[in-house]
Amino acid sequence: MDAPDYYDVIKSPMDFQTMRKRLKLDFYKGIPDAFADDCKLVISNAYTYNREGDYVHDKAKELEMAFNRLWQKYYSSTETGAAAHNNLAASTRPALVQIKSEYPQDDNDTPVYHVM
């Protein structure tokens, strides 16, 4: 990461790689609020570290709007928390992959992540 002061500015880091690992390990199963908290933390960190008008800050705004819309649609329904979580997680995965795919690839075809 090309942000040497990131951990001086951001005291509670969170990223999509960590969230993906947690999804695979069923970390969020039965506690959908933990998923929401982690997603909100990624967004909050992007706002804190990046200035308004920067690419990452603008993408964080888009992500926040999409997340809130999906959360309202799937979690605020009449379903139980676990069912809503499963629906939200399934519907969010393509959106996260799509956002990730917008970033340039390095020579090894590895995604280059911006600080969020």
Image (tube, rainbow, N blue to C red):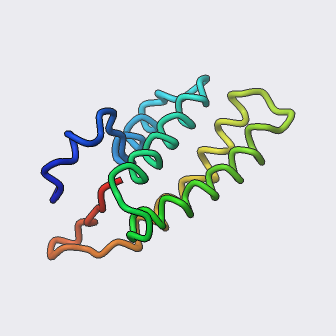
Residue 44: x %, y % from top left: 45, 45
Foreground residue among 42 and 83: 42
Residue 90: x %, y % from top left: 61, 48
Foreground residue among 32 and 109: 32
Residue 5: x %, y % from top left: 16, 48
Quarter of the rendering containing residue 30: top right
Seen at 67% across and 49% down, the residue is: 68
| Quadrant occupied by the N terminus | bottom left
Foreground residue among 83 and 78: 78
Left or right, residue 77 beside residue 11: right
Seen at 52% across and 42% down, the residue is: 40
Seen at 72% across and 36% down, the residue is: 84
Q: For the image shown, how many numbered marks are present on the structure?
A: 0
Q: Identify whether 88 is placed above or below 55.
A: above
Seen at 64% across and 53% down, the residue is: 91
Residue 99: x %, y % from top left: 46, 66
Left or right, residue 102 beside residue 74: left
Quarter of the rendering containing residue 19: top left
Left or right, residue 39 beside residue 114: right
Q: Identify whether 26 is placed above or below 77.
A: above
